[in-house]
Image: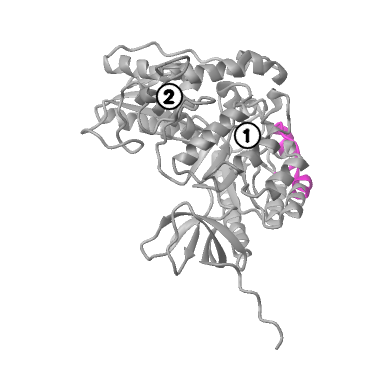
């Protein structure tokens, strides 16, 4: 069971590859249906915000109630370790460090051998502070561990004949992954960890410092995913704009994107998790103009008031963010933009909130996520003065979310008449098709319904014309726009 973000989805598929290679069979919603029920339920938890933590705990308790043995991995398990084990004796708590031997850990659980849970540590301290010191010290050994952990070896690598069907082959750079879904889009992790020190975020402390994957490893995994029926790659990390800095090349993402778009079978490459303060003009140009790369900008603004952003240990403000959006739209007028915002941060005034609302009104964002602030253990923001009452935070969230919903609907309506390229996900009962245009990321944004006279194939990119909008969703007809009739 996978909770949380797309990065967790990738981790779950690596874990699935490891355990199936060791002889385990997958069952349930994330695997093939075999047998009457699972012996062990593996829950990949999320520990980002309070609501996600509670959902993870509820899933663990629900799994335990089924009578199966329960194992917790992922961010919540890593972040709390022995403390979580004491509070939740129903589950065996494992660390990221257990992933390489995950099959052996499940063997222990099945045999009733309980291991002592780990004591959490600040994983940022496991690597040199300077990114330049990381490739030789950390990135290469991490790749080697991925190539060997838990899998049979023959001649220095796992033999293809030793791997079960659907598990990535060992040729070239290591790919350890078994798909747990069959959609035409899939996340592809390009880096792990984060070097930023945002005052509200605890992720770097348990995910560690930033480490880029090497391009050849990413390209090998992209090719394997294409062979599994994937047509859209969604590049994920904690901060994609930092990709390559620890490999000595800050422009590495700009160089990687065209290569990924040229992988046979891949129709679209999408980048997620961009930091506005790190978004370079060269990267904007590549994302806006490279065939096969979606002109889609997932920008982590978080707020638009300068004072609030400084308290968050972030940069920018309303005018600077609007200038960035203008730069993006000069490069590609129809570019898609989404962002998330935190409302009710300590010290946020009515003037700060108004600044955010003004920004949202001017920004013309396609997708907007609004979250209420909550204290996170071990973060600087948890000790800041000026905390707002929970009821006031909830009120502000509701007001800004209502505004955001209206603005997203207006933005969708402004696309009526536009030509869009829709990656077809599924056929609907009425004979039409559903998919996503370039400005619509899987699961987090809206969808486009395409009405077509002929049959469209799943994974096909169909050119269509937007004829209507329904909230954030679009309705389109297959085919390019019809030019207006000229004078007779």
Q: Which residue is mark 1?
A: 387
Q: Of 304 and 110, which appears nearest the observer?
A: 110
- How far apart marks 2 and 1 lie (CA) works out to 32 Å
Q: Is residue 305 magenta?
A: yes
Image-based side of 45 in relation to 273, left or right? left
Q: Looking at the image, which residue sits at the far front?
A: 155
- Sequence-first tag of 2 and 1: 2
- The percent coordinates of residue 9 (x first, y second) are 46, 34
For residue 18, what is the image quadrant?
top left
Q: How many marks?
A: 2
Q: Which residues are magenta?
A: 304-323
Q: Of 224 and 209, which appears nearest the observer?
A: 224
Q: Secondary structure at mark 2?
A: strand
The residue lying at 43 percent from left, 31 percent from top is 13
Q: Looking at the image, which residue sits at the far left?
A: 36
Image-based side of 299 in relation to 103, left or right? right
Image-based side of 399 in relation to 330, left or right? left
Q: Is residue 9 above or below residue 458?
A: above
Question: Residue 121: in sight, yes or no?
Answer: yes
- The percent coordinates of residue 363 (x first, y second) are 70, 53
Whether label 2 touches label 1, CB < 8 Å = no
Q: Which residue is mark 2?
A: 73
Of helix, strand and loop, which mostly describes the magenta segment? helix
For residue 406, what is the image quadrant?
bottom right
Q: Secondary structure at mark 1?
A: loop
Q: Residues within 10 Å of mark 2 (few under 14, many from 20)?
A: many
Q: Looking at the image, which residue sits at the far bottom?
A: 488
Image-based side of 355 in relation to 161, left or right? right
Q: Is residue 486 magenta?
A: no
């Amino acid at each position: 069971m996978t909770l949380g973000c797309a990065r967790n989805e990738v981790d779950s598929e690596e874990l699935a590859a490891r355990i199936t290679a060791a002889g385990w069979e997958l069952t349930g919603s994330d695997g093939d249906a075999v047998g009457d029920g699972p012996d062990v339920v593996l829950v990949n938890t999320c520990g980002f915000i309070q609501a996600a933590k509670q959902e993870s705990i509820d899933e663990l308790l629900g799994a335990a109630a089924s009578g199966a043995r329960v194992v917790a991995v992922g961010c919540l398990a890593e972040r709390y370790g022995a403390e979580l084990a004491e509070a939740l004796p129903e589950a065996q708590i494992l660390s990221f460090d257990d992933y390489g031997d995950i099959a052996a850990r499940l063997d222990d659980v099945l045999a009733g051998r309980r291991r002592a849970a780990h004591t959490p540590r600040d994983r940022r301290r496991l690597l040199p502070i300077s990114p330049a010191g990381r490739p030789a010290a950390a990135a290469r050994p991490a790749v080697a561990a991925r190539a060997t952990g838990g899998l049979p070896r023959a001649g220095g690598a796992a033999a293809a004949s030793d791997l079960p069907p659907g598990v990535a082959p060992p040729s070239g750079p290591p790919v350890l992954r078994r798909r747990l879904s069959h959609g035409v889009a899939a996340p592809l992790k390009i880096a792990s960890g984060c070097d930023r020190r945002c005052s509200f975020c605890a992720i770097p402390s348990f995910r560690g410092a930033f480490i880029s994957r090497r391009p050849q490893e990413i390209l090998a995994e992209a090719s394997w995913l294409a062979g599994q029926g994937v047509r859209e790659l969604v590049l994920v990390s904690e901060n994609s704009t930092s990709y390559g800095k620890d490999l000595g090349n800050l422009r590495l993402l700009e160089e990687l994107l065209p290569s990924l778009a040229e992988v046979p079978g891949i129709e679209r490459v999408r980048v997620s998790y961009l930091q506005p303060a790190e978004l370079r003009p060269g990267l904007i140009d590549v994302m806006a103009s490279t065939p096969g790369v979606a002109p889609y900008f997932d920008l982590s603004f978080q707020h638009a008031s300068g004072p609030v952003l400084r308290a968050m240990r972030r940069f920018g403000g309303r005018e600077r963010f609007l200038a960035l959006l203008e730069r993006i739209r000069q490069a590609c007028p129809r570019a898609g933009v989404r962002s998330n915002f935190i409302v009710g941060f300590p010290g946020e005034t009515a003037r700060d909130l108004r600044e955010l609302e003004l920004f949202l009104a001017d920004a013309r964002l396609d997708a907007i996520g609004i979250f209420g602030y909550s204290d996170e253990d071990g973060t600087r923001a948890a000790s800041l003065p000026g905390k707002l009452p929970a009821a006031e935070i909830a009120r502000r969230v509701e007001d800004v979310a209502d505004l955001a919903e209206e603005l997203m609907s207006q933005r969708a309506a402004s696309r009526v008449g536009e030509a869009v390229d829709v990656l077809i996900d599924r056929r609907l009962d009425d004979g039409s098709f559903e998919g996503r245009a370039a400005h619509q990321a899987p699961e987090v944004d809206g969808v486009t319904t395409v009405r077509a006279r002929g049959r469209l194939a799943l994974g096909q990119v169909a050119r269509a014309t937007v004829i209507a909008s329904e909230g954030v969703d679009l309705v389109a007809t297959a085919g390019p726009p019809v030019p207006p009739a000229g004078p007779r």
